[in-house]
Amino acid sequence: MTNETELIEQLKQGDETAFKTIVEQWKDMVYNTILGIVQNETEAEDLAQDVFIKVFEKINTFKGDSKFSTWLYRIATTTALDHLRSKKRKKRFGFLQALGGDGDEKVSIPDFHHPGVSLDNKERAAVLFKAIDGLPENQKTAYTLHKLEGLSYRDVSEVLNTTVSAVESLMSRANQNLRKQLEEYYNKHYR
Amino acid sequence: MTSKEKIQHEIEQTLQCLDGVKRAESNPFLFTRIQARMNKRSSRWEERTFSFISKPAIAIAIVVLVMAVNGWALWGGSGTSEVVTSELNGSELANEYNVVASINNYDYENMTNE
């Protein structure tokens, strides 16, 4: 913890070695969180870079009221969700352009395979990730942080700046929505 | 097992498939890439500033502004400098700039004790 505080202080002074240590220490955590939300490895890598650049630029706004990891998770989830929103806007604009008769290419979302999933669960996980992608933003974030990052409900509540009971409710609704989507999927494909 | 039960079983299995999932590992060269992007960003900022200044309209405006300031300094402010110089005669000027003192200081051969 002291080491973490020292690192942050050094980073506030603009120390590049401290920045490198922070990147090396938290890069997998940031990348995995973003990957769970955006479900695309190339985009997740670019966004992880964005997150650390933001950390370097905004470190002076970190007052230490929360854990550094909580602050980092907040930046990572916000960056990932902002990216998804802008992607959606672009897709909508592209759709309007297509209606105008400019092009007939359709963007198809490929199946996402998380590299941490075991081989025998690969297909099943791809189905689940597609369902997760259909969840509302806050449910998706809570579910990703809990399931992929293994955060407790308390930790998730700190990242989302809400109460533990609100996270419980988010998780319960997320599970209900996932069940509904999976039921539709298996009704279609399991025959 | 009925088809409904089979589907329920599939759903349960699918929901549990992320239990024990490993954390995805990021690119080992992530820091190098971040550094490259940060350098590119700062050089882009310099480039933008330089290209803004080197625009003909901006460059001409800067030259005109510099000339206007010079013109004001020469003609606009000449009245006050004239008044100051007219008040100073030769000896006052010499005293002002310590001309005598400096000559005496270097005139080692003709030094007299006063």
Image: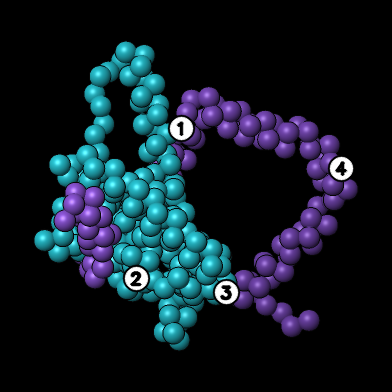
Chain colours: A cyan, B purple
Mark 2 and mark 4 residues within 8 Å of each other at the beta carbon: no
Q: CA distance from mark 1 to mark 4?
A: 41 Å
Labels 3 and 2 within one chain = yes
Q: What whole-number distance in Å separates the C-alpha atoms at marks 1 and 2? A: 54 Å
User: Residue at the spot x=79%, y=38% of the render?
Assistant: B77
**Residue A71 versus residue A165: which sits nearer the camera?**
A165
- How far, Cα to Cα, is label 3 from label 1? 47 Å
Q: Please say if the residues under marks 4 and 3 sit with CB atoms less than 8 Å apart.
A: no
Residue B113 shows in the view: yes
Which residue occupies 19% across, 62% down? Answer: A117
Could you tell me the amino acid type at mark 3?
A: Asp
Horizontal and vertical percent for residue A56?
44, 63
User: Same chain for the residues at labels 3 and 1, yes or no?
Assistant: no
Residue beneath label 3, please? A65
Disc 2, SS: loop
Residue behind mark 4: B83
For label 2, count other residues whose C-alpha is less than 10 Å away and answer few (under 14), some (14-19) or many (20+). some
Q: Which residue is mark 1?
A: B54
Tag 1 and tag 4 share a subunit:
yes
The kind of residue tagged 4 is Val
> How far is mark 2 from mark 4, CA to CA?
83 Å
Asked whether residue B34 appears in the rendered view, the answer is: no
Q: Chain of mark 3?
A: A
> How far across and down, in percent of the image, does residue B42 sit?
40, 50
